[in-house]
Each structure stands twice: as structure tokens, then as C-alpha cells.
Image (tube, rainbow, N blue to C red):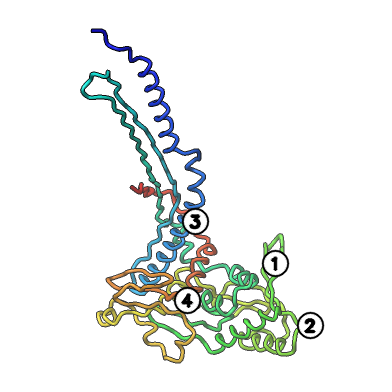
Amino acid sequence: MKLPDVSPCLGRLTAALFGLGVGTAALLTGCSHLGPKSVAVDRFDYSTAIADSWKQQTLLNIVKLRYMDLPVFVDVASVVAGYSLQTGGTVNGTLSTDRAVQGNYLTAGGMAVYTDRPTITYVPLTGEKFLRGLITPIDPKNIFFMLQTGYAADFILALTVESLNGVRNRSMTGGIVREADPEFVRALQLIRDIQAAGAVGLRVEVDKAKGDTTVLFFRRDDMPADIVEKSAEVRRLLKLPPTVQTFKLVYAPGRGAEGELAVNSRSMLQIMTAFASYLNVPEAHLKDHSAVLAFENTPPESRRKTVRIYSGKDKPADAFAAVCYRNYWFWIDNGDWQTKRALTAVMFFFTLAETGSPEKLPLITIPAQ
């Protein structure tokens, strides 16, 4: 018996299957590129994650200093985000004769595989240049240029300066806290008022033989009488000549010569140690002497308007930065703007410490699976 000619039907079925396969692939892949869409998401998500981890790393190292532990810094050297999208479609079918048992059937299927595999490279910050930058005092001109850009004088100087012309700030050395001289505290308040009135400024004088010199000057023209009086009081408190209006900034732990303002600026390690002195150490760690006493021995009246790092067994629900160390949580309250500002300033001071690029050590590259 002669079988019927099914070739026309097979041709139509093949064309239908091919069209269905093309349509399935187009549906899965779409008409847009994957890369451009990822830029807006990746750029902000990675920057937020790096900033948060930087805050936590800085806070952790400040806490560790209070326990005489070694601070360690690891930088994020690079982030390489890799994406892949694989799509596919399958269409098959059978066209039988009218006498076949199985009859006609058609099946179609599709798949899509999306892979997100970033590669993050970490660099331990170490080596001679980094350590030298960590223990080298910040250049006084960089500190005062921050005042010129609008940072509050009392806040910046209290954090970055050990003494001004021999008048000493609050400091912590060898676990012993020394409170600031009353003249220093009063001088910072007056400088802040003078700064707000626009009566203090900086200029750079260029000398080919001696190099650049940074000069601090007090303005007297068009200034209210109370600001002029405050400027005179600052000179009295800091033991500066009463008639001199301009002072050359120099680094020195004691008094400077006439016409000089001696600034005993802190290193990054000193700044972090001073910050660590305000840590609220858990009672258990005070009893076993694993942490150095500092703020706990400070009179209650001098604890006002200071930064605070809190501690507790439970992780805080809402914190600006929180780290776990020795089975306790240490954090900065999200509503404590003064401590938040101080931590942010500490992070910013790292750029003024001239720590430079780390040595070419082995990199730690971790593909995120």
C-alpha cells in the first residue's frame, strides 16, 4: 500500500518550529545589553559597601588600640564585576501518518542562566612607607588649611594637636590620660569664634631658598571690638606677642620663636589613640585588666560634649558603625553626630598622613562565588 505524501506538512511544521525557536530566543535575550544596566546599580552598591567597611575597619582598629592590640588595615584595591547571561531554546516535534499510533506532537522549551561573579582584590597596608606615615605627625599647614575650608577650629585642633605653643591638649600616653590645660580649651573656643567672624586666615609665602612658608594671620580691619579682644586673649593664652598679627606655622613640641606659632601636631596613631580613650570598656574587661583604663578615670564634669564609643553584648539595631571584638559589640550611635563627625574626620586624616601606596606585596584576590 502506498503511504500518503507528508512532505508539504513537514515543510510547514519545520518552518513553524524554526519560527518558534527564534521567538523563544528573542524572548529570553531581549533587545537590550546587560552591561549598561549594571553600571548604575554596581557603582552605588559597591561604593556604599566599601564606605561602610572602611568605617567599620577604622572603628575596629580604634577599639583594638584600647586593648593594646595591633591595628591592621586592608584596602580594597580593585573590584572587577563579571556578568554572563546564557539563553537557549529547544523545539521538536513529530508528524506522523494518519495511521500511526503515536499521532502528531510538538514540544518547546527554553532556558536562561545568569551568573554574577565579581573579583575583589584586597591589599594589606604595610611596609615602611605606610608605617612611617602612621607615626609621622601631620603637617601643621594641612591642619590649618582644613580650618580655612570651613571645618570648626575647636573640633579639628582638639583632635589633631597635642599642644599649641606649649599649651597642652588632652592626651593619652602609656595608658595614662592627662586632661587638657584650661588655657588650651579656652583658646580653642576663642579661635572658633574668631574663625566664624572671618578674622583669621592663612597664606602661603614662597621663598626660593627656604621653600614655601605657611603664615597664620589675625585680621583687625573692619572687625567688631569683641573679636579684636578675643584675638588678643588668644595671644595671651598661647603666650604669643601681643602686637604681632602674623605667625609662621612650625612643628615644635614647645614654644616657638617670636613670630612663630609652634604646633605639636599628632600622628595618625596618636589621633586614633586619643579617640580610643573615649571607649566605654565592658566591665568584664576592666576586671580582667585586658583593656587600658582611660575615660573611666575621667571626672564626670569633663566627660560632657565628648565623643563616645558604646559597648554591649547585643548587636545594636541602628548604629552608624558597629564591630564585634572579644565577644562584645562596640558601636557609635547613629544619633551622636559629634562622634560620627570625629570618626569621619579620622578617616579623612588618613589622606593627610601621606601614607602613600603600599609596597608590592602579594595580593589577596577572592572570587565571590
In the picture of the structure, the residue carrying the numbered disc 3 is: 44
In the rendered image, residue 353, in percent from the top left (x then y), is placed at 52, 64
Secondary structure under tag 1 reads strand
Secondary structure category for the residue under label 2: loop
Left or right position of 195 against 56 = right
List the residue tagged with mark 1.
204
Q: Distance between the residues labelled 1 and 2?
A: 23 Å
Of callouts 4 and 2, which one flags the residue occurring earlier in the amino acid sequence? 2
Q: What residue type is labelled 4?
A: Thr
- Number of the front mark, 4 or 2: 4
Crowd rating for badge 1 (residues with CA inside 10 Å; few <14, some 14–19, many 20+): few
Q: How far apart are marks 3 and 1 (CA)?
A: 38 Å
- Residue picked out by circle 4: 339
Q: Tell me how far mark 3 sits from mark 2, CA to CA.
A: 47 Å
Give the foreground label among 4 and 3. 3
Q: Earlier in the sequence, mark 4 or mark 1?
A: 1
Residue 133 position, x and y percent, is 49, 62
